[in-house]
């Protein structure tokens, strides 16, 4: 992967970085600056650095929520995998299968 040297401008501060995809980094730069601007609009009496910290706190909260949701999904996938492989017989499937026929007795 090719590394690109670029200058980012976040909240009026320049940062020289080296990154892989310039398009992705520019999208992140835009997202961060938009979040800071929203905080500045919400709290116009606060300094840019405080609004930057508030935006960072908001992003950290979103990341924590996403990580928790991701962990829940991983847990459900693992449970379904155990059901599928027959490792766990005591757990009832989370989804009822309305079109699945019962096997006739004695077959």
Image: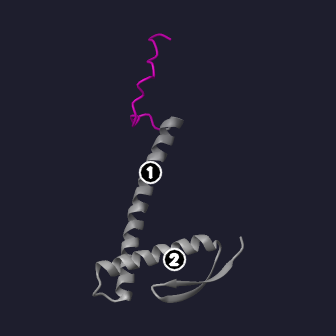
Q: Is 84 covered by the magenta stretch?
A: no
Q: Is residue 69 above or below residue 5?
A: above
**Residue for point 58% across, 70% down:** 24
Q: Which mark is residue 29?
A: 2
> SS of the residue at dot 1?
helix
**Residue for point 63% across, 74% down:** 22
Question: In what quadrant of the picture does the N terminus appear?
Answer: bottom right
Residue closer to the observer: 73 or 40: 40
Image coloring type: one colour
Magenta stretch, residue numbers? 88-107
Q: Is residue 96 above or below residue 37?
A: above
Q: What secondary structure predominates along the stretch shown in magenta?
A: loop
Q: Which mark is residue 73?
A: 1
Q: Can I make out residue 36 in this image? A: yes
**Residue for point 51% across, 36% down:** 84
Q: Which mark is residue 105?
A: none
Quadrant position of residue 8? bottom right
């Amino acid at each position: 992967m090719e590394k690109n040297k670029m200058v980012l401008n976040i909240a009026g501060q320049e940062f020289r970085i080296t990154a892989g995809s310039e398009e992705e980094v520019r999208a992140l730069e835009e997202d961060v600056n938009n979040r800071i601007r929203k905080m500045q609009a919400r709290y116009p009496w606060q300094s840019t650095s405080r609004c930057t910290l508030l935006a960072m706190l908001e992003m950290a909260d979103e990341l924590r929520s996403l990580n928790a949701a991701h962990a829940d999904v991983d847990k459900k996938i693992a449970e379904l995998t155990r059901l599928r492989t027959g490792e766990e017989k005591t757990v009832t499937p989370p989804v009822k299968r309305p079109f699945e026929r019962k096997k006739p007795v004695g077959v």
